[in-house]
Image (tube, rainbow, N blue to C red):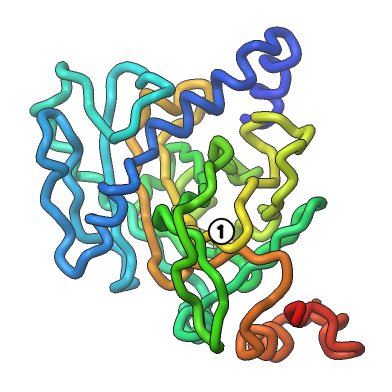
Amino acid sequence: MAQQQQQQLSQSRPELSSFLNAMTNPFLMMSQSQYRASRGGDLMQSFGAPNTLPISPSSSSSSSSSSISSKSSKPMSPNSSKLTTSSVNADKDTSDLDYKAELIDKDLWDQFYRNGTEMVITKSGRRMFPAFKVKVSGLDKRAKYILLMDVIPADDCRYKFHNSKWMVAGKADPEMPKRMYIHPDSPATGEQWMSKNVSFHKLKLTNNIQDKHGFNLFNHQTILNSMHKYQPRFHIVKQSDVMRLPWSDFKTFVFKETEFIAVTAYQNERITQLKIDHNPFAKGFRDNGQGKRDK
């Protein structure tokens, strides 16, 4: 599997570990201004710069998601801040990626979103609830795909919970380099992916900047800042070799209702109650009320 390939390569050439992550991230990254612009009611048709990728409304059945697709013939610079194609493929139509993704438990996500979703981060890492799960379609049954997700800052602000509501408290703190999380079943055929729900429940959120896992592409943790807002993203890559990710066709899905604020303890009691009502593992809350915010 791809995980074994990456681990073997990292062991034989340790210096490639950080390179691989750097090469994977930028080819799916957009700048903060581009991300915020893409969240408007009518998505922009282009970023406005030469050779930049078009943004098209998502083919997903979820009306609140957006998607991006591209093909590049050469790797991008690890310092790239926007999605760009090579000059060779600048005139190539990449709108033929008919991949679709539907967010599972959308109604539950909507309930949390209306109240301002919070996700707890800890030193050891805490899993997300609701879990990020999708149902994919439109894939070639015989082709192989790598599925990934990442969590990026939603804006450049720091927040505080005051008078029972979230408000901006200042400029965002510097972010640690963001990691891609490759689904452990990757690569798999389109038929295999479409036959089941794709769950990223193993991904953990942490505030431990001393995380010893380094930049392993299959690391199950991503480092976040408390009191900052984040947006998960889901990526479909048509590729059977993780080492060739930067050269591959891909499509990105953003579900607005999965946006959340990272916290070290729940601030909003309505969010705490939703966790208790719907999370079967929230036993600690039911027994002694743990997890409520510090007064």
Say which of 194 and 55 sits in front: 55
Q: Is residue 34 above or below residue 197?
A: above
Q: Is residue 147 left or right of residue 128?
A: left
Q: Is residue 139 left or right of residue 125?
A: left
Say which of 65 and 176 sits in front: 176
Give the residue at mark 1.
198
Residue 167 position within the rendered picture, expressed as x and y whole percent measured from the top left: 46, 74
At label 1, the amino acid type is Val
Taking the view exactly as shown, the residue that stands out farthest to the front is 170
Taking the view exactly as shown, the residue that stands out farthest to the top is 13
Residue 45 position within the rendered picture, expressed as x and y whole percent measured from the top left: 11, 51
Q: Which residue is depicted at the point 39% across and 38% down?
A: 28
Q: Is residue 35 above or below residue 209?
A: below
Say which of 137 and 19 sits in front: 19
Image mark count: 1
**Quadrant location of the N terminus in the rendered image:** top right
Q: Which residue is depicted at the point 84% across and 90% down?
A: 286
Task: Mark yes or no: residue 1 visible.
Answer: no
**Quadrant location of the C terminus in the rendered image:** bottom right
| Neighbours of disc 1 within 10 Å: few (<14), some (14-19), many (20+) | some
Residue 104 position within the rendered picture, expressed as x and y whole percent measured from the top left: 50, 72
Q: Which residue is depicted at the point 58% across and 63% down?
A: 227
Q: Indicate the quadrant where residue 154 lies.
A: bottom left
Q: Is residue 5 above or below residue 212?
A: above
Q: Is residue 280 left or right of residue 262?
A: right
Task: Mark yes or no: residue 214 visible.
Answer: yes
Residue 130 position within the rendered picture, expressed as x and y whole percent measured from the top left: 61, 73
Q: Which residue is depicted at the point 36% across and 29% down?
A: 248
Look at the numbered disc 1 and give the secondary structure of its residue. strand
